[in-house]
Image: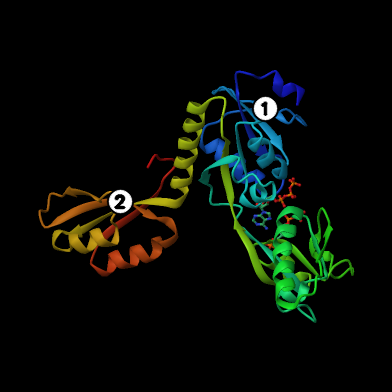
Amino acid sequence: MELIKDLPDRLLFAIPKKGRLHASCLSLLEGADIQFHRKSRLDIALVKNLPIALVFLPAGDIAKFVGEGNVDLGITGQDMVAEAEAEDKVTEILELGFGKCRLCVQVPVKGGATNVDQLVGKRIATSFEGIASKFFREVDANATSASGSEKKTELVFVSGSVEAACALGLADGIVDLVESGETMQAAGLHDIVTILSSQAVLIASKKPSHPELVQTIAGRIKGVIAAQKYVYINYNVERKHLKEASIITPGRQAPTVSPLENPDWVAVSSMVLKNNVAQTMDDLEAIGARDILLFAIQNCRV
Ligand SMILES: Nc1ncnc2c1ncn2[C@@H]1O[C@H](COP(=O)(O)OP(=O)(O)OP(=O)(O)O)[C@@H](O)[C@H]1O
Ligand SMILES: O=P(O)(O)OC[C@H]1O[C@H](OP(=O)(O)OP(=O)(O)O)[C@H](O)[C@@H]1O
């Protein structure tokens, strides 16, 4: 942290130093033209073309540091923000669309609890101590008011490989992240409750040192994300089908319509959502559109 004190004129931007979010963060930085060279094993890198210093930190620490104002800006998971109890201490600027997962209560498929009430008084292994204890305090309190018995669920802290805890006899259930469900299934577990859904977010401290730069970075990152979400479509269609075509490809404001030499036809171009683009092309073909071309958008501001 001493080094950071030597960087008063730069905005401090925290990036997960490894793990699930690291690679996507690097490609966002590249897309936003935030140029830096990270020297081997150094966790601070000066950005060449903007007054920013990147700080590479564990994803779990980023919410805390942004919340306390030690760094101005950061990327981490919403789960980490909740675990650090930093929801009110940071400004969530933007959901980034990657790192999507759910924090779930998981139990053994064979012989495990079928609902969380059956876990009252049992042992739960997790690395999400804060969220899990808050959740089970409530479960315990509800059970107490329903039955009068004052059993407390015991939390067992483990820092990784949480899914192994039940098989090792350490716990009767776990609280951990699920994305594809492969890790959970491989461990013979299934989820019975989702405590929260999460994705990576850009967060800022309440009083960033360079508020205008925060806006610049947010705008650039928004552009990169929008560019990943949309493609640009261009096609020719008979003028008499323009109304239907405009419904299929409405664009963000309206489609761009250009006249052709043949007055019965027009050329249309529009941004369309990438995840539905095959259906969009099928629908255009069905109304007689021709020469349908699709272009990747490298970057945009929308
Ligand atoms: N399987 C997954 N799919 C999608 N996102 C995930 C997945 N697992 C974790 N994440 C997201 O990535 C964040 C960091 O998870 P990761 O497992 O890389 O962290 P870690 O190993 O605890 O962190 P560290 O790098 O500090 O050791 C999580 O808080 C969550 O938001
Ligand atoms: O549902 P899935 O797609 O299988 O993903 C879930 C797994 O991903 C995360 O761990 P990760 O693989 O990042 O390793 P870690 O446990 O070392 O953090 C999480 O802790 C789960 O174990």
Q: Residue at x 65, y 50 (%)?
A: 82
Local secondary structure at mark 2: strand
Q: Residues within 10 Å of mark 1 (few under 14, many from 20)?
A: some
Which residue position holds label 1?
Answer: 45
Give the camera-side residue of 170 and 121: 121
Quadrant in the rendering for residue 205: top right
- State the quadrant of the N terminus: top right
Left or right: 172 in relation to 227: right
- Residue 193 is left or right of residue 31, and the answer is right
Q: Residue at x 81, y 55 (%)?
A: 160
For badge 2, the amino acid type reads: Ser
Q: Height in image: 117 above or below 57?
A: below
User: With 152 as the anchor, is 299 left or right in this view?
Assistant: left
Image quadrant in which you'd find residue 104: bottom right
Between circles 2 and 1, the one closer to the viewer is: 1
Q: Is residue 31 above or below residue 229?
A: above
Identify the residue at the far left of this view. 263
Above or below: residue 254 compared with residue 113: above
Where residue 148 appears, x then y in whole percent?
76, 75
Query: Percent x, y for residue 221?
Result: 50, 39
Q: Residues within 10 Å of mark 2 (few under 14, many from 20)?
A: many
Q: In what quadrant does ligand 2 lie? A: bottom right
Gap in angstroms between the C-alphas marked 2 and 1: 39 Å
232 or 6, which lies in front? 6
The residue type indicated by label 1 comes to Ala
Q: Which mark is residue 146?
A: none
169 or 52: which is nearer to us? 169
Residue 66 location, x and y as percent? Answer: 64, 36
Residue 190 visible in the current orientation: no
Can you identify the residue that label 2 sits on?
270
Ligand 1 is within 8 Å of the C-beta of the residue at disc 2: no
Disc 1 is placed on an element classified as strand
